[in-house]
Amino acid sequence: MNSLLSLRDLTVLRGACPVVDHITLSVAPGECIGLIGPNGAGKTTLLRGALGLLPAMGESSLAALPARDRARAVAWMPQAREIAWPVTVERLIALGRIPHLPHGARLGPADRAAVEDAIARMGLDAYRTRTATQLSGGEQAQVLIARALAQETPLLIADEPTAGLDPAHQIATMEVFATLAAEGRSVIVSLHDLGLAARHCSRLLMLNRGQLVADGPPAEVLAPARVAEVFGITAFYEDTGDGPVFQPMRVTR
C-alpha cells in the first residue's frame, strides 16, 4: 500500500535547539490520525516541517514535491483562520479547486461537484450566499474546512480545526474526518481535546518535547502512566459499546 506521507529523521531546529527531533513515520490511506501533546510539544512545527513550510533536516515525501503537485497531494488547514476577502461562502470553498484547474480556467462539472460535496459534508448549504467575512469565527472555521475538503486530496492535514467550535460542531467535524478515512482518504488532525482524539481517531501520535513518544491505537497511546508523564494529569478511559471515553480528572504536578 502506498504511503501518503513518509517522514524519515525529520528534524526542525530553532537556533541550535531541536523543536522536532528525528521523527520517522508514515501515513497510509484510510487513517484518521490524531496528533496530540502538551503545549510546546512541537505539533505545529512537525506539521509545517512535513509540508515543507519550515526549513528541516531529514526527509519528507511531501516537502520534496513541486508546489502544484503538493497541493494536489495534501490539503493544509493551519491554525490561522483569517478570511481576507469579502466573498461568498460558496466562492471561498471553490478556491479549493485551484490546484486542479489550468491557469485561468473556470470550474468544470467535477469541480462544482466537489464544492457541493464539501458544502454538504459541513452542513453549509444555508450559508452558501453569505459573505464569509461576516460569519462568526466558528462558522468561518467550518467554511475553511469545507475549502480543504473541496480540494479532494488523498491527505488532509488540519492544525487544531476544532478550536473555537461548539461541542456539536466539534463532533460533527471529527465525524467528517473519520468518514473521509473510511472512504480511503487520510486525515492528520492536531488536537488538544484528548476525548475527541480517543473517540474519533484510529491512530494517535503523541509528541513531547519534540519527540514522538507514542504511536498507535488510542487505548495504547493514552495509557494512564504515559498520560500522567506527558500531560501531568490522571484521566478516566473506558472503551464502551458506544466508543472510547476519555475524561481528564486531576493535575498530578
Image: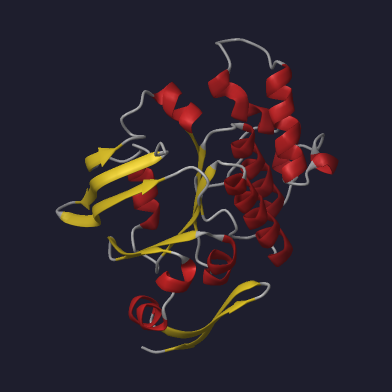
Q: Position of residue 162 (x, y in %)?
A: 60, 58
- Residue 44 versus residue 171 in the image, above or below: above
The answer, for residue 24, to whether it is visible in the render is yes
Q: At x 62% / y 38%, what residue is drawn? A: 149
Q: At x 41% / y 78%, what residue is drawn? A: 223
On the image, which quarter does residue 4 sit in? top left
Q: Position of residue 18 (x, y in %)?
A: 20, 56
- Residue 222 versus residue 25 in the image, above or below: below
On the image, which quarter does residue 2 sit in? top left
Residue extending furthest toward the left:
16
Q: Position of residue 155 (x, y in %)?
A: 50, 39
**Nearer to us in this view, 148 or 181:** 181
Residue extending furthest toward the right:
126
On the image, which quarter does residue 91 sit in? top right
**Nearer to us in this view, 233 or 185:** 185
Looking at the figure, which quarter contains the N terminus?
A: top left
**Nearer to us in this view, 191 or 218:** 218
Question: Would residue 35 be found to the left or right of residue 95 on screen?
Answer: left
Looking at the figure, which quarter contains the C terminus?
A: bottom left
- Residue 97 versus residue 158 in the image, above or below: above
> How many labels sit on residues?
0
Q: At x 53% / y 65%, what residue is drawn? A: 197
Q: At x 36% / y 78%, what residue is drawn? A: 226
Question: Would residue 231 be found to the left or right of residue 173 on screen?
Answer: left
Q: Position of residue 77 (x, y in %)?
A: 52, 43
The answer, for residue 87, to whether it is visible in the render is no
Residue extending furthest toward the front:
1
- Residue 117 versus residue 24 in the image, above or below: above
Question: Would residue 167 be found to the left or right of residue 66 on screen?
Answer: right
